[in-house]
Image (tube, rainbow, N blue to C red):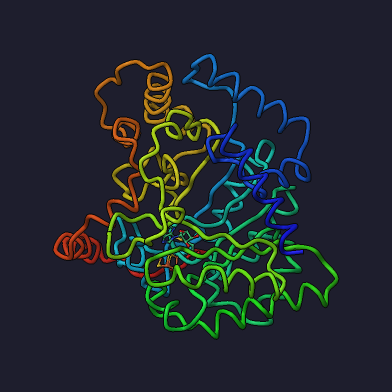
């Protein structure tokens, strides 16, 4: 069974690398098959047409929605900006159900998939279950990534009942000693118990969803545990095990095996970036980000709540970013620009994890000072 799984996902990954610049995943395929409609399909086709023609003022809408349901987290992962305690100039809060619902309503006719996280731990938001239920009613494929610390048997059953399609559990180790080196504040036997519980409940409920992926970020200190953890993961009923290269350039942390090292510099992938046409990425404070790699408020393209989706989607910031991407695709020199996409395209580097990597303690403290002077507190909306 495990071997069958592995071969299947190797084929999907190969197709993804070959034809979709590594952006196609199993969840995308499922969403396309199970959550389609004529309206979604025609929008998808027109988005590709827009990109091909270089249209920066688009009549199309996004086909993937990313809602950062919270930017609060209970762990302190050292290469994660949230884990470092940085707010990026944003209010640190959960996104309320009403806010999420309004955004879903604006784009549900064209969106295939709702991804319920960016930075922060989505299961800490008590409204996450309601958001899942609502998105399922609207025929969206719903997925999230969790550190699995806040799962309880009752919560797991409600996740299953709400109809969530895909859960990534982020557990980077096969023992407590290695796990807590990166997932600071977590407890290995507790998260493993939580994952076993949801797999057990799935079996008892006689359902096939959620599809559960175990994501294992590979570092120097845990690379020797990848194979044994993979074996164990399939034994307990995990659907997919993914050893994920870490986004960091810190040699002390990077694994020795080259196969587990990230392609942080990947110009080809950036040339094929389509996110400002395909994705609507909304942060917990309503900020509209260029993509999930963007972290700082200063780089946002707009803010929902203050503006409507229809006012933001073709505003100057979106048009600027689309123009730069088209210039890059066509091999032209990029115009000078303050857009975050400019440096991303020019350097081939993803902005966020690298910024975290490069921030020394002094600059982290400065950002935290700036944040505390804004008097932000973990705060829930309606
Ligand atoms: C910022 S987290 C937010 C979601 C949730 N808190 C979690 O950890 O799964 C989003 C994703 O980034 C991944 N991640 C965290 N640190 C990383 C790193 N250094 N390299 C690659 N991925 C990382 C997490 O495992 C997760 O899948
Ligand atoms: S990677 Fe996830 S669990 Fe770790 S600090 Fe960041 S948001 Fe929290």
The residue under the point 59% across, 62% down is 168
Q: Nearer the viewer, residue 197 or 232?
A: 232
Q: Left or right? Give the position of 231 relative to 360.
A: right
Residue 339 x/y as whole percent: 31, 33
Residue nearest the observer in this picture, 309 or 29: 29
> Looking at the picture, does residue 90 appear above or below residue 41?
below
Q: Residue 288: x percent and y percent?
A: 43, 43
Quick one: which residue is furthest to the left in this view? 362
Residue drawn at 59 percent across, 41 percent down: 64
Determine the residue positioned at 76% across, 68% down.
161
Q: State which quadrant residue 242 falls in.
A: bottom right
Q: Is residue 149 above or below residue 366?
A: below
In the image, is residue 307 above or below residue 187?
above
Q: Position of residue 218 (x, y in %)?
A: 44, 63
Res. 183 image quadrant: bottom left
Q: Residue furthest right?
A: 206
Q: Is residue 44 left or right of residue 284?
A: right
Q: Nearer the viewer, residue 345 or 141?
A: 345
Location of ligand 2 given as a quarter of the image: bottom left
* On-image quarter of the N terminus: bottom right
Q: Position of residue 144 (x, y in %)?
A: 58, 59
Tell me where residue 327 sits by quadrant. Answer: top left
Q: Tell how many labels.
A: 0
The residue that appears at 50% across and 31% down in the rendered structure is 274
């Amino acid at each position: 069974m495990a071997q069958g799984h592995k071969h299947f996902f190797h084929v999907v990954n190969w197709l993804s690398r070959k034809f979709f610049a590594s952006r196609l995943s199993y969840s995308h395929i499922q969403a396309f098959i199970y959550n389609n409609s004529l309206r979604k399909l025609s929008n998808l086709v027109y988005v590709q047409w827009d990109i091909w023609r270089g249209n920066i003022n688009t009549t199309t809408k996004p086909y993937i929605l990313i809602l950062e349901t919270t930017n609060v987290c209970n762990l302190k992962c050292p290469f994660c900006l949230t884990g470092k305690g940085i707010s990026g100039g944003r209010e640190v809060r959960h996104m309320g159900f009403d806010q999420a619902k309004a955004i879903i309503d604006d784009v549900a006719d064209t969106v295939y998939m709702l991804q319920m996280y960016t930075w922060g731990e989505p299961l800490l938001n008590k409204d996450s279950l309601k958001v899942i239920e609502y998105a399922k009613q609207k025929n969206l494929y719903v997925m999230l990534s969790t550190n699995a610390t806040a799962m309880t048997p009752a919560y797991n059953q409600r996740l299953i009942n709400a109809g969530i399609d895909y859960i990534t559990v982020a557990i980077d180790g096969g023992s407590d000693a290695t796990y807590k080196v990166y997932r600071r504040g977590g407890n290995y036997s507790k998260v493993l118990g939580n994952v076993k519980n949801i797999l057990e409940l799935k079996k008892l409920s006689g359902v096939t969803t959620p599809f559960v992926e175990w994501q294992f970020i590979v570092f120097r200190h845990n690379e020797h545990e990848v194979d044994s953890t993979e074996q164990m993961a399939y034994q307990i009923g995990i659907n997919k095990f993914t050893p994920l290269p870490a986004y960091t350039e810190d040699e002390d942390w990077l694994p020795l095996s080259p196969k587990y090292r990230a392609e942080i510099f990947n110009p080809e992938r950036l040339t094929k970036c389509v996110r400002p046409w395909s994705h609507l990425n909304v942060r917990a404070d309503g900020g509209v980000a260029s993509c999930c790699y963007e972290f700082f408020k200063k780089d946002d393209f707009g803010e929902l709540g203050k503006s409507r989706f229809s006012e933001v989607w073709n505003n100057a910031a979106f048009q600027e970013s689309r123009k730069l991407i088209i210039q890059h695709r066509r091999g032209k020199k990029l115009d000078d620009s303050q857009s975050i996409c400019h440096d991303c395209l020019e350097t081939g580097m993803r902005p966020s994890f690298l910024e975290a990597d490069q921030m020394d303690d002094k600059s982290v403290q400065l950002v935290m000072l700036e944040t505390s002077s804004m008097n932000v507190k973990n705060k829930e909306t309606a």
